[in-house]
Amino acid sequence: MEIDIEKLIKEAIEARERAYCPYSNFAVGAALLVGSGEIYRGCNAENASYPAGICAERCAMFKAVSEGHRDFAAIAIVGGRKGEASDTYAYPCGICRQVMSEWAGKDFKIIVAKSCADYKVYSLEELLPESFKL
Ligand code: THU
């Protein structure tokens, strides 16, 4: 499937504006492209009971699955200090990598971006080698 990387990053940057992160002040946005061509956005949503919060990536992935999509094509991730432009590549945490592995298509791409012009592209195998599968 053709992936418009810049469009996906733009969606992640917009998703990041919705991040609820008063405890960490680290805002993350994600945009997940599924097989139908639709894009699901996610942001991190924290909680006063810290472990109850969720990462932007899982937010996007569970939104997609709840709408019937189990064929993930690519995800773009943008993160950094709240209220500032991103100046770091925000890599997905281990739990989010594991969740990606459940529904990642064969050529699934992980894009970590500071901006539409500054990004890196990885396969899941690169970020989660020898992953656990039943
Ligand atoms: N966070 C994400 O949204 N995605 C990741 O892959 C790593 C961390 C969020 C969780 C928390 O709200 C904040 O970043 C600081 O850990």
Image (cartoon, helix red, strand yellow):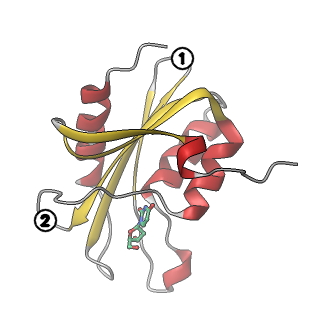
Which residue is rendered at x = 32% and y = 21% of the image?
Answer: 4
The verdict on label 2 being within 8 Å of ligand 1 is no
What is the number of the mark on residue 36? 1
| Residue at (42% x, 13% y) in the render | 2
* CB atoms of marks 2 and 1 within 8 Å: no
In the image, residue 21 above or below residue 105: below
Residue 30: percent from the left, percent from the top?
38, 47
Q: Which residue is drawn at 42% across and 73% down?
A: 46
* Amino acid type, mark 1: Ser
Q: Quadrant of ligand 1?
A: bottom left
Mark 2 vs mark 1: which is more N-terminal? 1
What's the mark number on residue 108?
none
In screen coordinates, is 49 left or right of 18? Answer: right
Q: Where is residue 120 in the image (x, y as percent from the top left)?
A: 32, 41
Above-or-below relation of 13 to 67: below
Q: How crowded is mark 1: few (under 14 residues within 10 Å), some or many (20 or more)?
A: few
Please identify the residue farthest to the top as the structure is shown. 2
Please state the horizontal and vertical placement of residue 23, each as a whole percent of the image. Answer: 33, 83
Kind of element beneath mark 2:
loop
Residue tagged by mark 2? 83
- Which residue occupies the foreground of this view, 88 or 83? 88
109 relative position to 121: left or right: right
In the displayed structure image, the side of residue 134 where residue 15 appears, left or right: left
Tell me the SS state at disc 1. Answer: loop
Crowd tier of the residue under label 2, counting other residues whose Cα lies within 10 Å: few below 14, some 14–19, many 20 or above? few
Indicate the amino acid at tag 2: Gly
77 or 14: nearer the viewer: 77
| Residue 100: % across, % down | 60, 46
Q: Quadrant of residue 118?
A: top left
Inter-mark Cα distance, 2 to 1: 33 Å
- Cβ at disc 1 under 8 Å from ligand 1: no
Q: Quadrant of residue 121?
A: top left
